[in-house]
């Protein structure tokens, strides 16, 4: 009886200790980002649960696949920004505990039919920003518990209805979709299922587009007002003064000289007045001696000096 009471008393403590040991096992993380690795390192602890190999030169070849099979306790695997172009069959065959797989920003253009075989606990799959042209819907059959599928920023123009029963969120934007009858199956599936189709978020490009549209509208409105209401334009033209050109000056002088020589156009002018006008017109004429006559010099004083 005493032993039973002792077991009952210490049972909560033993449960807490066991939970701590399990959590410690699931939190073994290795970060090998930006190490310029070309192969997945094979000297990592077998207890690793989170492995980040992003920003390297890994191709996920047959050697890498054999190394991954040793890490049976992996829960999260990150292979973003590497040199992966093909996902071969059975690439993750022994990773039965894997729940999150990131393979974005690679050059994946081929995914073989059994590439995801063995990932029956995978919940999130990210294949964004690759070069995927088409996908066989049967490639997702092993992913019986998948909830999030990200395929944005690829080269797909067609995507058939995926056979995913537990899918909750799918991301498909930024693909060159060909809007034909072939997409009806996908559209009907999205309308009838509970899957959420995530739309592209509004970024700075939309703000720039709105600014361009507003600028064009305002410019068009100003042009329309200028055409329909030219009163302000005439008002500006009334103050548009300019200097006389040389031809205009010559015509004015010719007209003035012509008027002085025609006696019919100048009535009641005495002979004395004509002499004064003649002197005014030729006051700055050049003499034979090369000097300019100044009309302000008194001729009587000159005579007395002589």
Image (cartoon, helix red, strand yellow):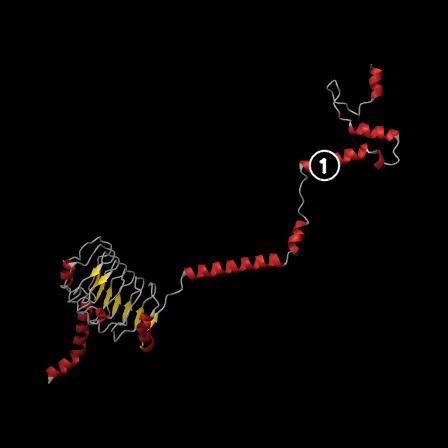
298 and 13: which is toward the camera:
298
34 and 39: which is toward the camera:
39
Location of mark 1 (residue): 251
Q: Is residue 280 left or right of residue 180?
A: right
* Image quadrant in which you'd find residue 143: bottom left
Q: Is residue 107 left or right of residue 287?
A: left
Residue drawn 66% across and 56% down? 231
Question: In x, y percent, where is residue 254?
Answer: 74, 34
Image quarter where the C terminus lies is top right
Question: In x, y percent, where is residue 67?
Answer: 14, 60
User: Which residue is the extreme one toward the bottom?
Assistant: 1
Residue 76 vs 58, above or below: the answer is: below
Residue 265 vs 107, above or below: the answer is: above
What kind of element bears circle 1?
Answer: helix
Residue drawn 13% across and 80% down? 7
299 and 282: which is toward the camera:
282
Question: In x, y percent, where is residue 182?
Answer: 31, 70
Image quarter where the N terminus lies is bottom left
| Disc 1 residue crowd, few under 14, some 14–19, many 20+, Cα 10 Å | few
* Image quadrant in which you'd find residue 75: bottom left
Label count reads: 1
Residue drawn 65% across and 51% down? 236
Question: In x, y percent, where is residue 66?
Answer: 13, 61
């Amino acid at each position: 009886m005493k032993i039973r009471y002792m077991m009952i008393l210490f049972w909560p403590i033993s449960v807490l200790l066991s939970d701590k040991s399990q959590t410690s096992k699931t939190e073994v993380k290795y970060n090998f980002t930006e190490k310029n690795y070309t192969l997945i390192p094979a000297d990592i602890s077998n207890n690793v649960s989170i492995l980040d190999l992003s920003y390297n030169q890994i191709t996920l070849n047959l050697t890498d696949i054999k190394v991954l099979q040793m890490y049976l306790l992996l829960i999260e695997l990150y292979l973003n920004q590497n040199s992966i172009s093909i996902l071969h069959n059975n690439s993750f065959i022994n990773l039965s505990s894997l729940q999150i797989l990131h393979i974005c920003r690679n050059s994946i253009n081929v995914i073989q039919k059994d590439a995801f075989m063995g990932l029956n606990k995978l919940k999130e799959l990210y294949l964004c920003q690759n070069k995927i042209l088409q996908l066989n819907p049967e490639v997702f059959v092993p992913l019986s518990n998948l909830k999030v599928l990200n395929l944005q920023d690829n080269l797909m123009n067609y995507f058939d209805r995926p056979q995913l029963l537990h899918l909750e969120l799918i991301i498909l934007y930024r693909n060159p979709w060909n809007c034909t009858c072939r997409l009806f199956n996908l559209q009907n599936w999205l309308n009838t299922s509970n899957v959420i189709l995530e739309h592209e978020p509004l970024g700075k490009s939309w703000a720039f587009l709105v600014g361009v549209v507003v600028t064009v509208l305002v410019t068009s409105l100003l042009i329309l007002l200028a055409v329909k209401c030219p009163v302000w334009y005439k008002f500006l033209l009334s103050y548009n003064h300019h200097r006389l050109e040389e031809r205009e000056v010559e015509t004015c002088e010719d007209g003035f000289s012509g008027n002085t020589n025609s006696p019919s156009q100048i009535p009641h002018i005495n002979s004395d007045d004509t002499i004064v006008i003649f002197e005014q017109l030729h006051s700055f004429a050049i003499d034979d001696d090369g000097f300019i006559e100044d009309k302000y010099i008194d001729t009587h004083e000159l005579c007395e000096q002589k």
